Amino acid sequence: MSQLVEVKVPDIGDFSEVPIIELFVKVGDSIKAEDAICTLESDKATMDVPSPATGVVAELLVKVGDKVGEGAVLLKLDAAGAAAAPAAAPAAAPAAAPVAAPAAAAHAGSADVEYDLVVLGAGPGGYSAAFRAADLGLKTAIIERYATLGGVCLNVGCIPSKALLHVAAVIDEAEHVSTAGISFAKPSVDVDALRAHKDKVVGKLTGGLAGMAKGRKVDVIRGYGSFLDPNHIAVEETTGTSQDKTGQNKVVKFKQCIIAAGSAAVHLPFIPRDPRIVDSTGALELRFVPGKMLVIGGGIIGLEMATVYSTLGARVDVVEMMDGLMQGPDRDAVKVWEKQNASRFDKIMLKTKTVAVEAKEDGLYVSFEGEGAPTEPVKYDMILQSAGRAPNGKKIGADKAGVIVGERGFIPVDAQMRTNVPHIFAIGDIVGQPMLAHKAVHEAHVAAEVAAGHKSAFDATVIPGVAYTHPEVAWVGYTEAQAKAEGKKVETAKFPWAASGRAIANGADYGFTKLIFDAETHRVIGGTIVGPSAGDMIGEVCLAIEMGADAVDIGKTIHPHPTLGETVGMAAEVAHGSCTDVPPARKK
Ligand code: FAD
């Protein structure tokens, strides 16, 4: 008898309208529980949707390019069909067969050191977890392969990119102010000095972290960690600024462990190794400013780096497989961004793929396919690959600890951040989307608190996303597109910055602040801001959502004047019908 199970997109965090970039199944395929069904690509990374059950694909309801959110039905699975299929097990698998945990190994040897809690990885997730655990009284160590704490975010992600984006913003602003009668000479760029400035910013923060680890008596064990069993990690010691091995090994014993081993940039297999082809880490090294640069992937990381390099003088093309840049926020916000950035790019090739790269002495010759593809290969001086990030779950010997790792390297966890092995937790990029530092830190605190015996759980309603480009684009909770896709009734209120005194004074009257309210409860459930400092302002909308605020709560909160932040209050007043800074609402 046929038992059709609807396979839906699971909770993918704060993302909706996420495009399907790859489908791994077709009607008639026999699939097992945890087999990947499709790959979704958000603006920061890619993720696979695993099948929750074993069965035969009876009906496929999506195709590549479709945009989906949590709850969207991908396919119908005939769970009984698994039994009928020749290669299947004799009995039909249950609809949501639990994923089998790998059999844990047993370390027979001794340990060199022992801790209450060991944290694997010192990114924003790892160091936050370790510091919180130490503050709660646990004897804690961090294992980290690199010389400095801070992981991707502090060393090669959030912070260095923002140091460079700040400089780019100052250059752009200096040029814009010419409309106010102030002209500066064309900037001369000293790339070495700029790199040193960025390194100094990073050094200040990573040095600060080392001091805080010491202050809390958190030991930092330098080396590459890999599980030996559910209570031991082997550490291959590393030295220098990279991952050079010393040849020395150490065994670390733990009562509890938090895995915070993060993610790595995806490298497209057909792209050759060449010093002129970089990922975000290579781009942040700022070795040179190319004449002509190609950015593969129009997500946030790619567009942030494109902003920096174009301001420094590179001519930039962007190629993106999907039908728009910066997937995630509503298109009206992206349109504003596109208009403000039109002069920055030579070509934006949408619905287009890079299919080949030939590295020659005089340049990198790139061939494209798709709607925006040039007919002949195009020559570039530098290529930035920013086609997403993949979790490091398969690189840490998790199976020896009996920890389940999904097909693509994500580690499933519960609301207390526990893996299937109750004394081993996982947090940050390695547990799923969105791959963002602020999510990692919140998960870190939960895991550390639970490990210390506190009743804690990750129950954030929303996680904001921000593109720190010029202008910034920030969004949180529901977008209009998501509400439409889900058939959710919402009320939208938009405050155009053309009506904000401060935005006009700052030359940012193109921006807007939009709030989205649940049409039934009238509570705010989403917000999008585009304009300078949008990322700083979206926090208020996050708080309003978490507190269950409505338009009156926000609008009656006195915001300082004249500020850009005031536009959040004004958008709420627009919703409420009490805004006196916009033309009167038409009588209904
Ligand atoms: P990571 O920061 O990846 O840290 C993991 C750590 O574990 C690393 O230090 C790694 O060396 C170590 N490690 C891994 N395996 C082992 C092992 N076996 N043994 C020892 N050590 C190991 N997020 C934002 O919120 N805002 C931003 O503006 C932002 N900008 C970004 C810009 C760029 C260019 C990039 C690439 C990312 C950006 N991100 C941003 C994402 C952010 O950096 C990540 O979400 C965040 O760093 C994840 O933290 P984590 O602790 O999970 O892992």
Image (cartoon, rainbow, N blue to C red):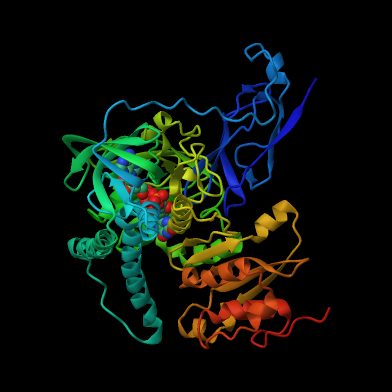
Total marks shown come to: 0
Report the residue that reaches farthest toward the right.
Answer: 588
Q: Tell me: residue 222, above or below residue 197.
A: above
What residue is rendered at 16% in x and 46% in y? 240
What residue is rendered at 36% in x and 70% in y? 169
19 vs 357, nearest the viewer: 19
48 vs 125, nearest the viewer: 125
| Residue 336 visible in image | yes
Image spot of residue 83 (x, y percent) = 70, 16
* Quarter of the rendering occupied by the N terminus: top right
Dividing the picture into quadrants, the one containing residue 207 is bottom left
| Residue 291 visible in image | no
Left-right relation of 480 to 298: right
Q: Tell me: residue 492, above or below residue 195.
A: below
228 vs 437, nearest the viewer: 228
Left-right relation of 312 to 422: left
* Quarter of the rendering occupied by the C terminus: bottom right
Dividing the picture into quadrants, the one containing residue 99 is top right
Image spot of residue 519 (x, y percent) = 76, 66
What residue is rendered at 31% in x and 49% in y? 142
Image spot of residue 381 (x, y percent) = 28, 48
Left-right relation of 83 to 13: right
